[in-house]
Amino acid sequence: GESVGLHLPTLSVQEGDNSIINCAYSNSASDYFIWYKQESGKGPQFIIDIRSNMDKRQGQRVTVLLNKTVKHLSLQIAATQPGDSAVYFCAETSGGYNKLIFGAGTRLAVHP
Amino acid sequence: SQTIHQWPATLVQPVGSPLSLECTVEGTSNPNLYWYRQAAGRGLQLLFYSVGIGQISSEVPQNLSASRPQDRQFILSSKKLLLSDSGFYLCAWTGKGLAGGAQYFGPGTRLTVL
């Protein structure tokens, strides 16, 4: 069935470096993708989204890239800060009614 | 602006006891509502979703049920809890529209079944 997965379960970076978190999806019909950040003990927080008619979208310090040819999604965080430490999930829509399928998550650890 | 509330924040219940978790949304009308469960260190599993009052769809066969008695209220229940029901329960909402939109999550309820 459709699935959304992540290449790296844990990513460690130095403060100030750029971070790249990757995600693969399997449903070529998915048309909407979201990145969430989840801090320990809290609900996921919306970071940025992208629709399938785009290949890049930028926010504040974050950029999402979508490569539909290889069904790959990435989240780039510029000048990573300690406050960016969290688990990051990608998600795709599937099945209508805005149902999202989430990947397992990548833990980002930022070291001073 | 829209806000989503969940309570209680934490709950410790014995096996076999009933459960009722509540979720309410403010600042929007006719939202789609969702219940997820998250095991420790894992991703989110969709349990139920609702597109309107009294309309509930179940994604996974389980010991739980959901109800939507009011437009902005979503309740997760169980008659008899199992140890495997322990987890972090998250409610989310989204507005209706073409091609979906982001889901926005509540703060979650940490349930421990002993």
Image (cartoon, coloured by chain):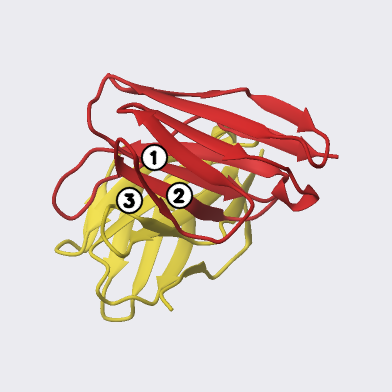
Chain colours: A yellow, B red
Q: Nearer the viewer, residue B56 or B22?
A: B56
Which residue is located at x 14 percent, y 64 percent? A53
Label 2 residue SS: strand
Indicate the position of residue A10 as horizontal and vertical percent values. 64, 59
> Is residue A112 left or right of B96 when viewed as pictured?
right
The residue under label 3 is: A63
Label 1 residue SS: strand
Chain that bears disc 2: B
The residue under label 2 is: B48
Asked if marks 1 and 2 fall on the same chain, the answer is: no
Indicate the position of residue A90 as horizontal and vertical percent values. 43, 57
> Is residue B27 left or right of A53 when viewed as pictured?
right
Instruction: Report which quarter residue A45 is drawn in.
Output: top left
Chain that bears disc 3: A
- Residue A38 got which mark? none
The residue under label 1 is: A46
Q: What's under tag 1, amino acid-wise?
A: Phe
